[in-house]
Amino acid sequence: MLHDDLNINNFYVENFKVPQYQTFRLNKINTLQYQEADPINIDGNTDFHNQAGNQGWDLNGQRDGSESAPYVIESFSFISSQITTTLIQIKNTDIYFEIRDCEIIGDQEYPGIDLDYTMNGNISHNNIFNCTNGITLSYSSDMVIENNYLTNNSVHAISLTNDSDRNQILNNTIIRNHMGIYIGTGESDLLNDLHYFPTSNEIYGNFFHYNSFGGVWISSSKTTLNRIVSNYFGTDGGIRFTHTANNFAQFNTFNWSLIYIYYSENITIMKNTVFNSSMTGITMENSVNAILKLNSVYNCGSNGILFVNTNNTKCMYNTIVYNGYKIDDYGVYLDSDSTLNSIRYNNFIGNNPEKPSQIYDEGESNTVSHNYWSDWTIPDDNTDGIVDDSYIVAGSANNKDQSPHVSLIEYQTSNGSNWSLFASLFSFLMIFVIRRRYRPKIR
């Protein structure tokens, strides 16, 4: 069992819904006519009701903060010029509200929007610049953050900490921040041994580019069940999982970026496309029980996939192509402290052609079996689809693939579709077209 809606049965994926490829539509900076406004500070439902009436967020009594009639804060300009403070701060509320079509420009001293012990908000179509954190959620749940443009924020574009659960971060454009999205621990009650962690959040359909410390960082051991799905990561650090467990990255595109897993367990990396990274495409370090499945890793300057002191990880049904420009790099590299990993049913094509092997293993008890190797396809005298001679794995482990496939391995899902090299190359082409069409205008 991988997680609730995915399990493996006879090498087929069961009960898995394959979404359509994400078309990455960049959010443009709003050019609305804004009304200048003073910073907002709300503490509690009663205060929210009172300010909504006084400020007109209730649309002259038509809205009452219910799910069907949320308060609306829209078309305002909040600029931290002479006032150094958080521009919108809401805490201790559970009524429904929207913040939309606003301009929020900070002084890189405070967050732009700060939500603390808050629920049931929607933050959409805002321009958020020059803050520490563009949007901060602490102990805040059931929020939707969508279609915003966040840039030049000095810490995080969006930060979720301290039991901020079940939030959705959708279709935002996140460019030139120090860090894109951070999900991890904040406060801890060390006296009572209490720690607070965000769980079950979804990051879907966002565009990340030129964020200096990475697109998404998920950290802390109980920061679990967070899903990173169908995002585009341009030139930045991609995704980092550190000291965490039971999180998922699926259907994402990484162009000049990568996936890094550090001191983590039970991480599922599935159906992602990683290409053009100047370093290793997917790195696992000091980690256990990960699943790398149905990914495509192309044209990375170092190793395609790297195992460092990593154990009990399944690397299966991946397509690993033209990685390793350096003499010591491979399609897959397992170091001396990596044990009990399984490298099976993958397609290896043209990785480090200067080497006699596309994979290197100096660990212990790693299984390499039933892979396709582009440099080892004959002889097959009995025509059983398996090359008669074993494929020799480089490295001190003296490992070998005793059942190398003659032909490319096609990966079939329960709906009958094949996830083969050809499908992967088609997705690669589509991503290239999307990048050309929706190339961001960096300011």
Image: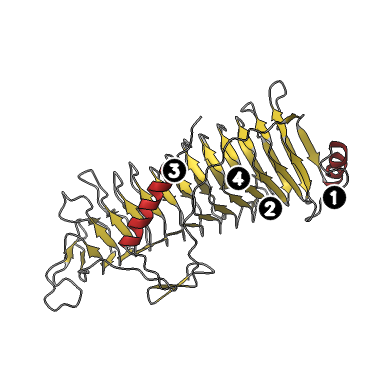
Instruction: Evaluate if marks 1 and 2 touch, with contact meaning CB atoms under 8 Å apart.
Output: no
Instruction: Evaluate if marks 4 and 2 touch, with contact meaning CB atoms under 8 Å apart.
Output: no
The residue tagged 4 is: 147
Q: Which mark is residue 64?
A: 1
Identify residue type, mark 1.
Asp
Q: Which mark is residue 183?
A: none
Instruction: Evaluate if marks 3 and 4 touch, with contact meaning CB atoms under 8 Å apart.
Output: no
Identify residue type, mark 3.
Arg
**Residue that appears at 27% across and 58% down:** 363
Task: Check disc 4: other Cα within 10 Å, few if <14, some if 14-19, many if 20+.
Answer: many
Q: Is residue 199 left or right of residue 34?
A: left
What x and y, as percent, mark residue 199? 60, 56
The residue tagged 3 is: 437
Identify residue type, mark 2.
Ser
| Badge 4 or badge 1: first in the primary sequence | 1
Q: Which mark is residue 141?
A: 2
Question: CA–CA distance between discs 4 and 1?
Answer: 25 Å
Question: CA–CA distance between discs 3 and 4?
Answer: 19 Å
Camera-near label (4 vs 2) is 4
Q: Is residue 430 left or right of residue 55?
A: left
Question: CA–CA distance between discs 3 and 2?
Answer: 35 Å
Identify residue type, mark 4.
Asn
Query: In the figure, 265 relative to 303: above or below?
Result: below
